[in-house]
Amino acid sequence: MHVQVMDHPLIQHKVTLMRKKETGSKDFRNLLEEITMLMGYEITRDLPLEDVEIETPVAKMIGKQISGKKLGIVPVLRAGLGMVQGMLNLIPTAKVGHIGLYRDPQTLEPVEYYCKLPDVEDRDFIIVDPMLATGGSASAAITLLKEKGIENIKLMCLVAAPQGVQKVNADHPDVRIYVAALDDKLNDQGYIVPGLGDAGDRIFGTK
Ligand code: PRP
Ligand code: URA
C-alpha cells in the first residue's frame, strides 16, 4: 500500500477534534482548513525554485521564487470544497477546478454530475477530498483529469480506509496519496471506521 500519512502532532490533534461527534460545523470547517494548510505545506515541499534578482531597501540580492508548472486545485464536490481555502491560503495564484461526484448510496459507485477545470496546459494538479473510502470517487476524479491530458496529479485526503488507498494504488499507480489518518476499515454502508461520519454533511450542516 502506497500512501504518505502526515502525522505531525498538530495534524493528529486537530483530526481527533474533527472526529468527535459533538464538534459542530463551524469548528469542523475551521479545523479542516487548518489541517489542509499543515498538509499542504508538506505536500508542496518539492516545488522547484529559481533564482531571482531583487533589491531590498539595503542591497541587491539573489532571492528564490517558485518556478516550474503552475498549480491547479481540484476539490471533489461537495466535501472537497472544505479544503480549497486552506490550499489557496498557501498558493493564492492556484486555479481551482471542480469535479462533482456523489456516491450512489446503494451501489457506492461514483456518479459524475459536474466538471469544470481551468486551463490544463503546463499545470500540475492536487485533488482534494476529505474522505477516501472505497476509493471509487477519487479514482473517477483522477481518471477525469487524465482524460483531459493532465499527467502530474497528487491526491490529498484527510481520512482514508485501506480499501480506498488500495483501489487508487491499483487504478493509478502514478498518483501519490497523502492522508492525515489511515483508519481501520469500511462498515456495511461504506463509511470509514472509526472515521468522522459524513464529511459533506458535517461541513455544510446538512443531514
Ligand atoms: C464523500 C467524500 C468522497 C466520497 C468518498 O462524498 O467526500 O467524495 O464520499 O467515498 P468513496 O471513496 O467510497 O467514493 P459523498 O458522495 O458523500 O458526497 P458529498 O461530498 O456531496 O457529501
Ligand atoms: N464519505 C464520507 O463522507 N464519509 C465516509 O466515512 C465515507 C464516505
Image (cartoon, helix red, strand yellow):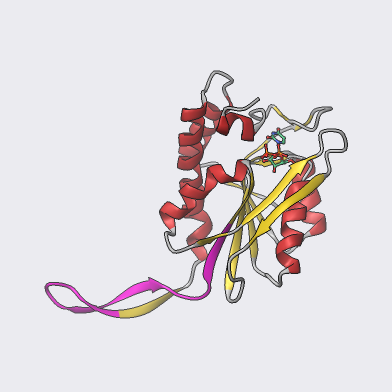
In this view, which residue lies farthest toward the top? 22
Q: Position of residue 199 (x, y in %)?
A: 63, 34
Please tell me whether residue 158 is drawn above or below residue 120 in the rendered image.
above
Q: Position of residue 42 (x, y in %)?
A: 50, 54
In this view, which residue lies farthest toward the left? 58
The reply, left or right, for residue 130 in relation to residue 28 is right
Q: Is residue 32 visible?
A: yes
Residue at 58% in and 66% down: 118
The reply, left or right, for residue 55 in relation to residue 58 is right
Please tell me whether residue 187 is drawn above or below residue 97 in the rendered image.
above
Residue at 59% in and 29% down: 202
Nearest the eye: 58 or 102: 102
State ligand 1's quadrant: top right
Quadrant occupied by the C terminus = top right
Q: Is residue 180 visible?
A: no
Nearest the eye: 204 or 88: 204
Q: Which residues are magenta?
A: 53-73
Residue 72 falls inside the magenta stretch: yes
Q: Position of residue 82 (x, y in %)?
A: 54, 42
The overriding secondary structure of the stretch rendered in magenta is strand
